[in-house]
Image: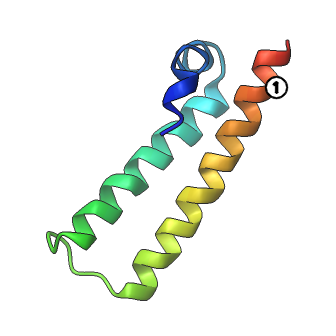
């Protein structure tokens, strides 16, 4: 996820509590989706799709913060 911004992510995680919270929530959702898709957790397709959409929104929010950080 956003590997090309590894340095910026590291900097933001150290300096921006909101970014860290969004980053951690995205990672948790990613793990939850993987668990559901591999049958480790029972979940409906609708629930999985909802989590994927939320993950995408969080990723977009992180990208916006990263790009703003790069401008500064």
Residue in front for this viewpoint, 22 or 53: 53
Q: Residue at x 77, y 17 (%)?
A: 70
Quarter of the image holding residue 42? bottom left
Residue at the far right: name it: 72
Q: Where in the figure is residue 23, as x and y percent of width and height?
A: 52, 38
12 shown above or below 34: above
Q: Where in the figure is residue 34, as x and y percent of width and height?
A: 28, 61
Total tally of numbered discs in the picture: 1
Q: Where in the figure is residue 17, as x and y percent of width and height?
A: 62, 26
Q: Where in the figure is residue 12, as x and y percent of width and height?
A: 62, 19
Per the image, label 1 sits on a secondary structure element best described as helix
Coloration mode: rainbow
24 shown above or below 48: above
Q: Residue at x 49, y 29 (%)?
A: 3
Quarter of the image holding residue 46? bottom left
Residue at the far left: name it: 40
| Direction from residue 60 to residue 32 in the image, left or right | left
| Direction from residue 44 to residue 68 in the image, left or right | right
Q: Residue at x 57, y 68 (%)?
A: 53
23 shown above or below 4: below
Please tell me how crowded label 1 is: few (under 14), some (14-19), or many (20+) other residues with Cα within 10 Å: few
Provide the residue designation for mark 1. 68
Quadrant of image for the C terminus: top right
């Amino acid at each position: 996820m956003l590997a090309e911004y590894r340095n910026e992510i590291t900097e933001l995680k150290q300096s921006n509590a909101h970014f860290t919270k969004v980053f951690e929530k995205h990672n948790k959702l990613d793990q939850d989706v993987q668990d559901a898709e591999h049958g480790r957790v029972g979940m409906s397709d609708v629930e999985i799709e909802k989590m994927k959409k939320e993950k995408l929104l969080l990723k977009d929010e992180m990208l916006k913060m990263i790009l703003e950080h790069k401008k500064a």
